Image: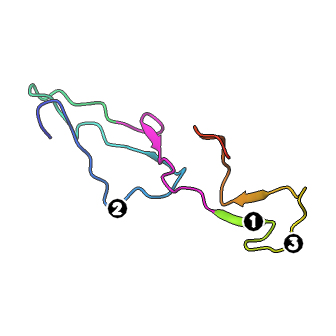
Amino acid sequence: MSNNIVTITPGSQLSTVGMAYTVTMAMGVIMDESNNKFAGLSGAAYGFTVKDTTPPTVDDFSPAKDAYGVDANARVVLTFSENVKKGMDEIP
C-alpha cells in the first residue's frame, strides 16, 4: 500500500484463459487517514477475465503434410487448435 494505491498480489498465477476472477474484501480492511472505513468489495463489484496469450497451432492439414500426388484443384484446409480470424497480412 502506498498513499492512495493498493496493489493486490494473487497467491498463485492467474493462468486459466477465459476464467472470470473477482476481488472481494471486507468493509474496513482499508481505511483513510481519518479512520473512515472503505465499504469493501463484494459479489461482482470488481472482476476481470484472463486474456488468451497462447498462439494457435495447426492440428490438422489437408492435404496431409508431405502428401504426394495431390490434385491440382485440391483445396488447402488447415484446422487450428482454437477459433481464428484474419490477421494483418495476406496469405500468399
Circle number at residue 61: 1
Q: Nearer the viewer, residue 81 or 16?
A: 81
Q: Give the label on residue 69, or none.
A: 3
Question: From what the image shows, is residue 72 above or below residue 40?
Answer: below
Q: At x 73% / y 74%, what residue is drawn?
A: 66
Q: Who is closer to the viewer here, 16 or 84?
A: 84
- Give me the C-alpha separation between circle 2 and circle 3: 52 Å
Compute the Cα span from label 2 to label 1: 37 Å
Q: Secondary structure at mark 1?
A: strand
Residue 56: in magenta span:
yes
Q: Secondary structure at mark 3?
A: loop
Residue 59 at x, y = what percent?
69, 66
Q: Earlier in the sequence, mark 2 or mark 1?
A: 2
Q: Residue at x 48, y 47 (%)?
A: 51
**Mark 3 surroundings: few (<14), some (14-19) or many (≥20) residues within 10 A:** few
Bounds of the magenta span? 41-57
Please tell me how crowded label 1 is: few (under 14), some (14-19), or many (20+) other residues with Cα within 10 Å.
Answer: some
Residue at position x 9%, y 28% in the image? 33
**Is 68 situated left or right of 53 in this image?**
right
Q: Kindly check if marks 2 and 1 are in contact, taking CB atoms under 8 A apart as contact.
A: no
**2 or 3: tag closer to the N-terminus:** 2
The crowding category of the residue bearing disc 2, from other C-alpha atoms within 10 Å (few below 14, some 14 to 19, many at least 20), is few
Provide the residue designation for mark 2.
12
Say which quarter of the image contains residue 80: bottom right
Q: Earlier in the sequence, mark 1 or mark 3?
A: 1
Q: Distance of mark 1 from mark 3, alpha carbons?
A: 15 Å
Type of amino acid under label 2: Ser
